[in-house]
Image: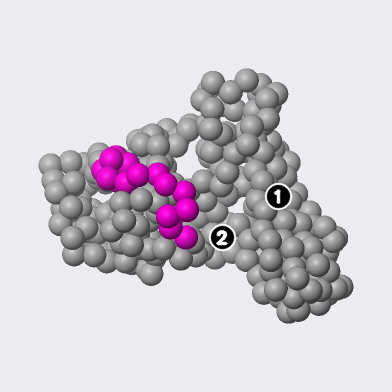
């Protein structure tokens, strides 16, 4: 069953003195792919700026803009209307021998590499070995995601945007970003190509058409076992029509919703509001 959703993501900044110049990138535009059709999308700023759009190395749409008039506040709004479908388990599959071959290792080198957010860890390597035992690669993806779901407690505020998967696992607490990073550690240790996905999740499975709810940015993973498909370890569910994907990369550092540099005053306040409406 497909859904049509409107997503409005607004971020507001306040500064203690006028900012004279700022250079920014926004990754707020949903992806168009086999699971999603983007009907409408735009990124607006207040004060108004000139912007241009490009697609980054990982395939994420980026809206870049700079502002050179003095300002003490900046508001960035991404508005999109998207039709979504649930992921269908791919018919194309590979076995462990194929995954360990040089052709796949070369092709997906970056999706198999460890990073600062997704570091190699000896204890997690032992767990990964046990999780993949006697399982197909597809079943191992689900097993790893469900292990993370059972191992972690969802506690906002206990980790930050710079927390690594190992640090979050040590605390056994975190948010969706940490769940995704920890799952990526396990899958890359197993030799399964995988990537971080940023986006949004409508929180209500039985959402009424026309109702607007407060949402939030969300993160999950996609794994390649013959084709790419998604799983949400934070909720231990396959990615479905409630998920709106925006960015893909090796980890969070490749897909932050907003990043930039500025000169002038110091940032004193940040407000993020995400509203999601099921339209059909």
**Residue 213 image position (x, y, % from top left):** 64, 32
135 to the left or right of 170: left
| Vertical order, 221 against 259 (above or below) | above
Rendered residue at 55%/53% (across/down): 247
Given residues 75 and 130, the one toward you in this image is 75
Q: Which residue is mark 1?
A: 10
Residue 210, by quadrant, is top right
Given residues 210 and 56, the one toward you in this image is 210
Rendered residue at 31%/61% (across/down): 166
Given residues 144 and 13, the one toward you in this image is 13
| Vertical order, 219 against 27 (above or below) | above
Q: Is residue 156 magenta?
A: yes
264 to the left or right of 2: right
- Which residues fall within the magenta stretch? 146-160
State the SS at label 1.
strand
Label at residue 256: 2
267 to the left or right of 35: right
**Residue 186 image position (x, y, % from top left):** 27, 54
Rendered residue at 73%/79% (across/down): 263
Q: Is residue 186 magenta?
A: no
Q: Residues within 10 Å of mark 2 (few under 14, many from 20)?
A: some
Rendered residue at 67%/53% (across/down): 271
């Amino acid at each position: 069953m497909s859904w049509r959703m409107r997503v409005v993501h607004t971020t507001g900044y306040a500064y203690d003195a006028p900012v004279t110049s700022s250079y920014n990138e926004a990754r707020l535009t949903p992806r168009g792919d086999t699971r999603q059709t983007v009907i409408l999308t735009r990124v607006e700023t207040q004060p108004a700026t000139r912007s241009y759009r490009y697609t980054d190395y990982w395939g994420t749409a980026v809206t870049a803009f700079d502002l050179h008039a003095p300002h003490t506040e900046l508001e960035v709004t991404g508005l999109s209307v998207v039709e979504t479908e649930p992921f269908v388990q791919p018919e194309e599959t590979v076995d462990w021998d194929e995954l360990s071959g040089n052709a796949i290792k070369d092709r997906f080198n970056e999706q198999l590499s460890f990073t600062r957010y997704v570091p190699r860890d000896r204890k997690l390597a032992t767990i990964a070995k046990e999780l993949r035992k006697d399982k197909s690669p597809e079943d191992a993806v689900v097993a790893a995601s469900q292990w993370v779901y059972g191992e972690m407690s969802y506690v906002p505020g206990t980790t930050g945007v710079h927390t690594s998967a190992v640090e979050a696992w040590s605390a056994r607490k975190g948010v969706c970003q940490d769940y995704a990073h920890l799952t990526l550690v396990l899958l890359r240790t197993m030799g399964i190509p995988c990537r971080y996905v940023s986006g949004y999740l409508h929180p209500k499975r039985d959402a009424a058409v026309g109702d607007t709810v407060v949402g939030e940015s969300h993160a999950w993973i996609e794994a390649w076992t013959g084709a790419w498909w998604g799983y949400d370890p934070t909720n231990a569910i396959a990615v479905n029509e409630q998920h709106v994907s925006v960015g893909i990369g090796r980890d969070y550092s490749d897909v932050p919703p907003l990043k930039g540099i500025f000169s002038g005053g110091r940032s004193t306040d940040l407000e993020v509001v995400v509203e999601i409406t099921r339209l059909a």
